Image (cartoon, rainbow, N blue to C red):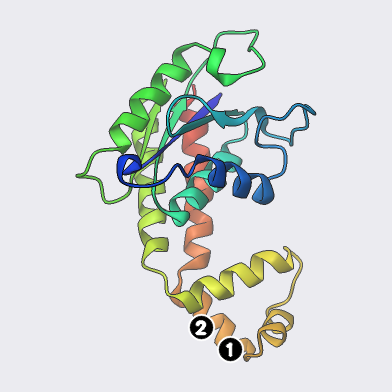
Amino acid sequence: MFILTIDQRGSRRDTDRVPELLRVTQSEWPGIIASSSGSSRDGVVLGFERTVGDEVQGVLDDAGLVVDVALTVLRWGGWSVGIGCGPVDEPLPESSRAASGPGFVLARDAVEAAKSRQRVVPLAVRGAHHDAGLDAEAVLTLAAATAARRSAAGWAAIDAIEQAGPDARQEDVAAQMGVSQQAISQRLRTALWQEELAARRAAAWLLGLAAG
């Protein structure tokens, strides 16, 4: 199981951004936030909700989804992301606030580590398999650091490709953006998009190993 604990950075100097995070997360990944309707998407065990202070937490069982959520939240900025990979006490309650188990302890350790000012990327992973957790952290950190240096043009090309869907052709996306297919290809190469996709797959695999 994977527990994501996401804490607002500099909350004493800023407004409470948790409602914004939950709202945007809901639009990005419908069903990830806990709701009275009980709706959920594949990979979500307990939806994200505020746990304490300026912190939200969710429980997932899909390593690829964990990677997507973590890297997207890091792209938004202003958050520390801790990922705990390990078993949980079952049966799980309806709320992550009432849940317990080794995975939750690991997530707490991870988010505290992620808050360190010495980290270039405010992310940490702690796993039942310790070394695999550190390896997953290293790959995710590299992917996030690469994305942080990406130009606005690079992000525009990536966002357009993702929104168009997996079967979209670059020439069609280029036409929609009003640029040439060569320009889209160049932007994606400069942005190291294919390399990030490979890193995401590696990170998901390592998270699975870290969970034991």
Q: Are marks 2 and 1 in contact (CB under 8 Å)?
A: yes
The percent coordinates of residue 62 (x first, y second) are: 62, 34
Using the rendered view, name the quadrant where residue 89 is placed.
top right
Looking at the image, which residue is at 73% across and 69% down?
164
Is residue 130 in sight in this rendering? yes
Count of residue discs: 2
The percent coordinates of residue 106 (x first, y second) are: 40, 21
Is residue 189 in sight in this rendering? no
Q: Residues within 10 Å of mark 1 (few under 14, many from 20)?
A: few
Q: Which residue is mark 2?
A: 186
Q: Amino acid at mark 2?
A: Gln
Circle number at residue 182: 1
Looking at the image, which residue is at 36% across and 32% down?
111
Q: Amino acid at mark 1?
A: Gln
The percent coordinates of residue 163 (x first, y second) are: 69, 65
Relative to 169, residue 109 above or below: above
